[in-house]
Image: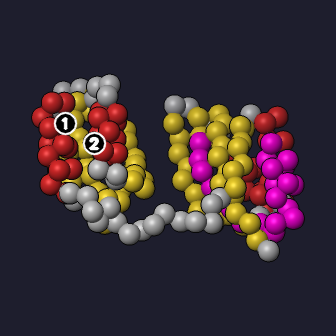
Amino acid sequence: MQTSFIVTFIGDDRPGLVEQLSSAIERCGGNWHESHLSQLGGKFAGLVLVSLPEDAAETLQETLKGLASSGISVRVTPASAVAASGEGRRISLAVLGPDRPGIVREISRALAAEQVNVIDMESEVSSAPMSGEPMFRADILAEIPQSASMDVLADALDAIAEQMTLEIDLG
């Protein structure tokens, strides 16, 4: 019988880090299914969904913990067999505006108020082309329950956009 785990890792960014992790997973009989990996602040971090024979789970955990000696911090978490309901509607948000503290907090608060589940989010701060001003950009994929009001959510996001001088496109 197969079992699945989410492997979360972070280490100093360097060539060979992914190979080291994937080799350790393969040595334990694991199969790398999905991943989200990214370079952030001089570090390389990621989430990996792996499956392996149930009797190899303990070996996987011990093998990956052993990577700490090479500077990779790893956490292994059993994956849930129950997926999200998927009964809602998928929505996307594109956010752009001058960077300032609180943007993610305000938007996530508005989403939570309508029981919107964030599925994927990517964000970055970069320099505006003409002024060099720090600009915040985020792309969010989420699921809103059928019972929730898109109008209420749109109004809340519009208020945030106005207050924080942002463009928030809800699609």
Is the Cβ of the residue at disc 2 closer than 8 Å to that at disc 1?
A: yes
Q: Is residue 125 left or right of residue 131?
A: right
Is the residue 28 above or below the residue 37 in the image?
Answer: below
Q: Hey, which quadrant is residue 45 in on the image?
A: top right
Q: Can I make out residue 44 in this image? A: yes
- Please name the amino acid that badge 2 sits on: Ala
Residue 151: x percent and y percent? 15, 54
How busy is the neighbourhood of tag 1: few (under 14 within 10 Å), some, or many (20 plus)?
Answer: some
For disc 2, the marked residue is: 110
Identify which residue is drawn at 53% across, 41% down: 39
The residue closer to the viewer here, 35 or 115, is 115
Quadrant location of residue 104? top left
At label 2, counting other C-alpha atoms closer than 10 Å, the crowd grade (few under 14, some 14-19, many 20 or more) is some
What stretch of residues is rendered in magenta?
A: 45-65
Q: Which residue is mark 1?
A: 160
Label 1: which secondary element: helix
Task: Tell me: 157 left or right of 68.
Answer: left
Mark 1 residue type: Ile
- Give the SS element for disc 2: helix
Q: How is the image coloured?
A: secondary structure
Rendered residue at 84%/42% (across/down):
66
Query: Residue 87 magenta-drawn?
Result: no
